[in-house]
Image (cartoon, grey):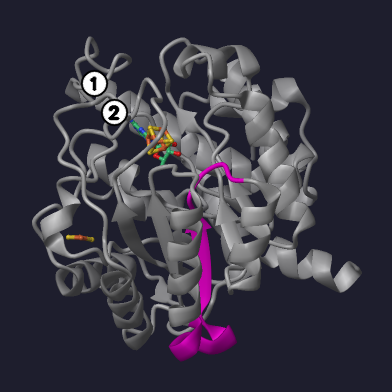
Amino acid sequence: MNPLIEKALARPYNLEHDELAALLSLDDPTELFDAAYRLKCRYVGKSVSLRGLVELGNNCAKNCFYCGIRRENRNVSRYHLSEEDVIRMAHWSFLQNYGSVVLQSGELESEENTEYIERILKGIRSFGGDRFGITLCLGEQTEEVYRRWHDAGAHRYLLRIESSVPELYARLHPADHSYARRVECLKILKKLGYQTGSGVMIGLPEQTIDHLARDIAFFHEMDLDMIGMGPYIPHRDTPLGKEIECTPEYAARQLDLGLKMIAVTRLYLHDVNIAATTALQALDGRGRERGILAGANVMMPNVTDTEYRKQYQLYANKPCLDENSAKCRNCLNRRIVSIGETINWGQRGDSPHYRQNRKNR
Ligand code: 5AD
Ligand code: SF4
Ligand code: FES
């Protein structure tokens, strides 16, 4: 076996920067993926946790250069789900025994939005009790807002740093988007007791292997519980994506790097939850299964009503646009079974890292 893989398997956080970079640069990643998959099985078994993904709305106050629903993209018609609709979609996920939901939307900071989310959280708690997981993915907020949402029943929060390298972050965002504030938000979320997740986009223009190795080190420095990351996929209505053509070769490279990041992250951090994100499937029909086989352990079936899905396209080629939630459930189930894994039905699927830390406290 590659001695670096052996070293990584021995215990968490056991690789130097150059060693992380060397693993990310392997020409043949077969052994890397196999080892990461075995390590995933050591922590959570041959099982995948599900989260029903509700895309609450595509209004966003931000203007990230890579994202299809950025504020200045006039080609998107904007929508906003009613509380009743969101609660219905979450309830459907509950009845399907998914075990948890993720509520995601563009970034909005207003008292109105804060209360809307509070009411949704209380609605979900009223049928889901404590055994149904709720993850929020609603961007940067004040400590006060994070606290109110935690009090209302949210217990996990995902806020991607997008790139942990400040110079690269600055090239991907307008000047008023602050890297420092994002890091501060992650610290607040942790302090408030959320299971905290972050992640990056992989294969961004001007991003190097060195940057990606730093991203993995950042996950450790921030002591994260969950990682949600995926390949960057150009969107033609964005400043960053308009010139990039997604040829089959480009897609294959993005996928390969995305899978390597999952595997090396698993080998370095060991006990975190890692999502096999939909972006992987935008590049390859079996992308998400391949993510699991490279060390991920979470999948997020879309439970948003079909009519809204086309409006929530952060990147090109998003899958499941014409399918409904029942179809996605059957499809994902089949995919998971096809790789010899089972679904953690009815389980919150908390991060083993978080559970471990709790025990130590
Ligand atoms: N390609 C891949 N991922 C993207 N995201 C936004 N735009 C793109 C893109 N073009 C990701 C960001 C964001 C998450 C919700 O979607 O990482 O945090
Ligand atoms: Fe808004 Fe998130 Fe898209 Fe940035 S990545 S424009 S914050 S939805
Ligand atoms: Fe939606 Fe396959 S998961 S169609």
Name the residue rendered at 28%, 35% in the picture: 69
Instruction: Report whether residue 6 is seen.
Output: no
Residue 31 position in % (x across, y down): 53, 41
Q: Amino acid at mark 2?
A: Ala
Relative to 39, is 250 above or below? above
Residue 246 position in % (x across, y down): 21, 21
Residue 195 vs residue 72, the one in the foreground? 72
Relative to 11, is 172 above or below? above
Viewed as shown, does residue 139 lie left or right of 340? right
Viewed as shown, does residue 304 lie left or right of 129? left
Relative to 24, is 57 above or below? below
Q: Does residue 128 show up magenta in the picture? A: yes
Q: Amino acid at mark 1?
A: Glu
Q: Where is the N terminus found, in terms of image quarters?
A: top right
- What distance separates the C-alpha of mark 2 from that of mark 1? 5 Å
- Residue pointed to by mark 2: 252
Helix, strand or loop under label 1: helix
- Residue pointed to by mark 1: 249
Residue 47 position in % (x across, y down): 48, 72
Residue 294 vs residue 54, the one in the foreground? 54
Name the residue rendered at 58%, 25% in the picture: 212
Do the CB atoms of the residues marked 2 and 1 lie less than 8 Å apart? yes
Q: Where is the C terminus found, in terms of image quarters?
A: bottom right
Helix, strand or loop under label 2: helix
User: Where, by quadrant of the figure, is residue 336 drawn?
Assistant: bottom left
Which residues are drawn in magenta?
Answer: 125-141
Residue 163 position in % (x across, y down): 56, 26
Determine which of the numbered discs, if any, sits on residue 360 in the image.
Answer: none
Viewed as shown, does residue 327 lie left or right of 196? left
